[in-house]
Structure formats: structure tokens, C-alpha cells
Image (tube, helix red, strand yellow):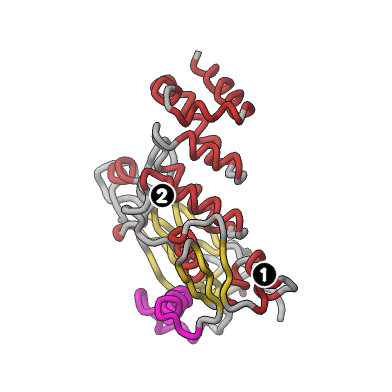
Amino acid sequence: MSSLLVKIFLFLSWGHDVNTKGISLSLELNTTSVSKIVTADYEMGLLNKYGRPTAESWIKSTDTFYWDGGFCHGNLMKRSDLELNYISDDFLIIFCSISVIHKPHEMLQNCSIGASPFCLTENLGALLERQEETDVTYKVEGENISAHRLVLASRSTVFKAGLCGHMLERNCKEIEINEMNALVFRVMIRFMYTDSLPDMDDLMSGGYFYQHLIAAADRFQLEGLKILCEARLCMIVSVNTVVSSLVEAERHKCDYLKKKCIEFIAKPENFGSVSVTEEYATLSSFPSLVEEILGERLKFE
């Protein structure tokens, strides 16, 4: 089977009038070949300040891209709404997932928006929910969490080594996971099936849940989950959680989150409140982080 390399560009644009619905998202096929035709199943949109998708900006479609054009989804919202609800500290998250469909594009001519037959993550999520034909069970904090070996092995090299390699786990029907929160493990497993996170308003606790998820993602080498949690933590940095987020960023090599936390702590309006917390005192175990914070503070003197 030959490999297919496709480049599709994503653009965000807005008008000059902040009160006009001028915000738009567009996709264009990056090619100079007149004969290049690509059909893709895509989902994209903006994540608000809390790292969650919103109906007004969310787009899900299947379209055929040609060399001389693309697809623009305009009039999503006013620029004033974008600045108020989506931009935090000059930071904006755009989610875009694109899957090239290896089928003749003529087969998809009757496929309309909202009626796409390509719903792999939804089907896998339903399979997990129904617990059909599960063949491995993990015991975490006394809870039994069942899943499918092939799905886990296909998403994580760590799971693959344990379930398909020469480790003892290969022949075990029940495997115990230590030093892991049961809810964190359950949410991580769900992500492996759906590439998404549940609505976690009740779970976030100011961002601590995402910190635990980052640790789990790093442990099981789930880079997509790690990036998503890092992006959401960047959006909800606060005086109470910034130090613990900084420590997790340092431990798990989340460079952008580390940068955001150091910048937040170093700001004159934040440093006084952060420096008197018990968490800040724990940074004595991370002298390099303290040095970087002090270096960042020099920019404000």
C-alpha cells in the first residue's frame, strides 16, 4: 500500500468591525498539482477560555478538496465575542481533526454536513460504553475497568508492550495498576477510544485533574492526551494552581505550560500572592525553576 502525504492548511480570519459576525475558519489543500483531489472527514472549531468546544464555532463535515480551492465556514461569531470568550492572555486554541478518506471521492457526493457515515470514534466510544467483548480488566484503587486489548495496544506503545509483548501481562485477564487514580485511569481509557475528554466541570478542581491526566498520559505515552491537557491548563492558570502546574510541566516536559506558568508567577500583580502560598515553598526542591522565575521577574524591573 502506498503512503499518501496530504497538506491541508487551516486559516482563521476576522473583519475590522468588532460587532459584525466576521470570524471564519477555512481549510485549503496545499498542492500545485491540478490532478490532486482529496476527500477528507474533518472536525474543527474554537475552544473557549475554559478549554471546551462551543456550538457556535464547531464544524463537522466531509468535503472534497481540489488544487485551486478550499472550504470557508464564515460568520461564526463577532470579533468582540472572540476576544471576550475565547482569548486569554493572548492565547487562543483552535481544534482541528482531519482524516483523509482513502476512497473514490465520487462515493461521497451525497454526503451532507451532519450526515457523515464516518464516525469511528463515536462507534469505538459506544463499544466501550456497552462493554462488548472486552478481554482485559484493570484493577485501579479497587475498581474494575475493562477494555479491549487491541484498541489499547494500537494507541499506546506502553500498553502494547504489556499486552502483546513478552511481559507477564500478556496472558493476564486482570491487571493491577498502582499509583493511579481510578477516575483518571477511566478518563484516559475513554480518550484512547474517542480522542476526546468528557465535560469535566465537576472534576477539574481548578486544574488539578488535568495535572493528574498529564502524568497518566506521560506514563502511558499518549502524546495527544498530554497536549490537550497542557493546552487546557494554559487556559486556567490561577494563583492556587500555578505552582503545581509548573512542577508537573517540569516533570513531564510540557514546555509551553512551563513558560506560561513562569510568566504568570513573575508578573508583579501575581508574584506577591503566589509567593506566600505553601506550594511556592515547595519550589525549593526545584532550584532551576526558581532561577527561571527570578530571571523572568527582571523583565518587569
Q: Which mark is residue 13?
A: 2
Looking at the image, is 263 positioned above or below residue 37?
above
Which residue is found at the position 49% from the left and 86% from the top?
107
- Give amino acid for label 2: Ser
What segment carries the magenta color? Answer: 106-133
Give x and y (percent) for residue 187: 45, 62
In-image side of 105 versus 286 (left or right): left
Residue 242 or residue 298, whichever sits in front: 242
Which residue is found at the position 47% from the left and 31% from the top?
279
Looking at the image, is 201 positioned above or below residue 196?
above
Q: Quadrant of the N terminus?
A: bottom right
In-image side of 279 versus 258 (left or right): left
Give x and y (percent) for residue 10: 50, 56
Which residue is found at the position 63% from the left and 64% from the top?
32
Give x and y (percent) for residue 293: 55, 25
Residue 64 or residue 154, whichever sits in front: 154
Indicate which disc, 1 or 2, sits on the residue closer to the N terminus.
Answer: 2
Q: Is residue 70 visible?
A: no
Instruction: Look at mark 1 in the image and give the residue it sits on.
Output: 162
Looking at the image, is 112 positioned above or below residue 81?
below
Which residue is found at the position 60% from the left and 42% from the top?
251
Q: Please, which residue is most extreme toward the right here?
A: 166
